Amino acid sequence: MTEDFSTQYTGKTVAITGAGGYLAPAILDALGPHPDRIFLVSGQELPGKSGVVNIQADIRAADCWQEIVTSADVIFHLASNTSVYAASEDPVGCLDSTVKPVSQLVCAAQVLTRQPRVVIASTVTQYGITNDLPVSEKSPQHPITNYDLQKMFSEKQLLLASSQGVLEGVSLRLGNVYGPSSNTNASGDRGILNKISRLALKGTKLQVYGDGNYIRDYVHINDVARAFLAAGVSESVVGHPFNIASGQGVTIRDAFRLVAERAEAITGRKVAIKNIPWPIGAEAIECRNFVADINAIKLATGWSPLISFEYGVEQMIHNLMPK
């Protein structure tokens, strides 16, 4: 039986940065009513929600982190650049939004002499192009994009601070996350299964770059939310990075085919799939095969993914159907 990590947040104060993004609503739902207080931090104005405090602030600013670290026992840091292509086009701006906030967080913890648990969202693409599958946390990291280089630096910065006793840091390297979210502000090159599901429900032809035979490790957003909750309270995770994925590989073409089949079963409209050439300027990281070894997080927390890819896609299609 899987542990209900949400009950371990009773009486705690939790802060979630990037609260206007893709992952935050799932984490908020998973927390339920247990935390004493919840701060949702975003650069944009958020709608009011009972039981939570909205903070509109710039996460690059020192005073933002002073406010968060003063109160929070657990910080889920989701805010940063989420686009490989944005990091390529504007490396300085994305460095500012990805690395600087972690520096400010560490400084705030040092100044205030508080040691919050800090769980950051990182990425499995930090490993670069991998040849031996599955990939464990002990595998070398060879980032080949500015995005992955910046994510790796942020992770190392946090874990260094953790090793020095400044805070309790944990990094979650996320696989290909999919599934419904009440926030739709994910970057255009993220959440591809969500995007093509909407197209498939309209009967629109799906386009696959190349032969579609590259392997991905898809993990449902609700399983990812549970992993964050586990990392926020488990003692044996402090100071370590963990892969968060399903541990199962699916080719891109098979993933598209499953979406098309499930959409067709609901709408009755045939959804064609067409292979097209890779666009000019496509990042080399797109041409990778990846399956995660997730044994480390299982052993440390008891967490494991509960939602199969087939079931997750079917539920996502149903959820995206016009009401």
Image (cartoon, rainbow, N blue to C red):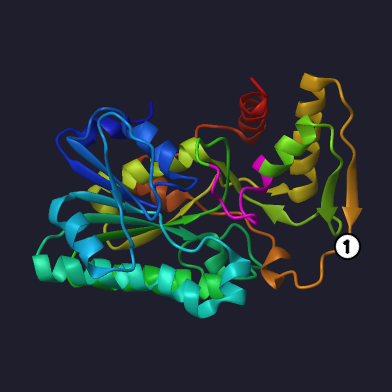
Q: Residue at x 80, y 34 (%)?
A: 260
> x and y percent of residue 227 in the render?
40, 43
Callout 1, which amino acid?
Answer: Pro
State left or right for residue 55 relative to residue 178: left
Crowding at mark 1 (Cα within 10 Å: few <14, some 14-19, many 20+)? few
Comparing 75 with 228, the one in front is 75
**52 shown above or below 77:** above
Residue most extreme to the front: 45
Magenta segment, principal secondary structure? loop
Residue 6 figure quarter: top left
Q: Residue at x 41, y 45 (%)?
A: 298
Residue most extreme to the bottom: 92
The region drawn magenta spans: 184-194
Residue most extreme to the left: 113
> x and y percent of residue 268 in the render?
85, 20
Secondary structure at badge 1 equals: loop
Q: Quadrant for the N terminus, please.
A: top left
Comparing 176 with 319, the one in front is 319
Residue at the disc numbered 1:
277
Q: Is residue 187 located in the magenta-colored stretch of the structure?
A: yes
**267 shown above or below 204:** above
Q: Is residue 249 located in the magenta-colored stretch of the structure?
A: no
Residue 323 figure quarter: top right
> x and y percent of residue 138 in the render?
46, 67
> x and y percent of residue 286 in the render?
70, 64
Q: Residue at x 41, y 53 (%)?
A: 296
State left or right for residue 4 relative to residue 193: left
Q: Does residue 310 appear in the picture of this structure? A: yes
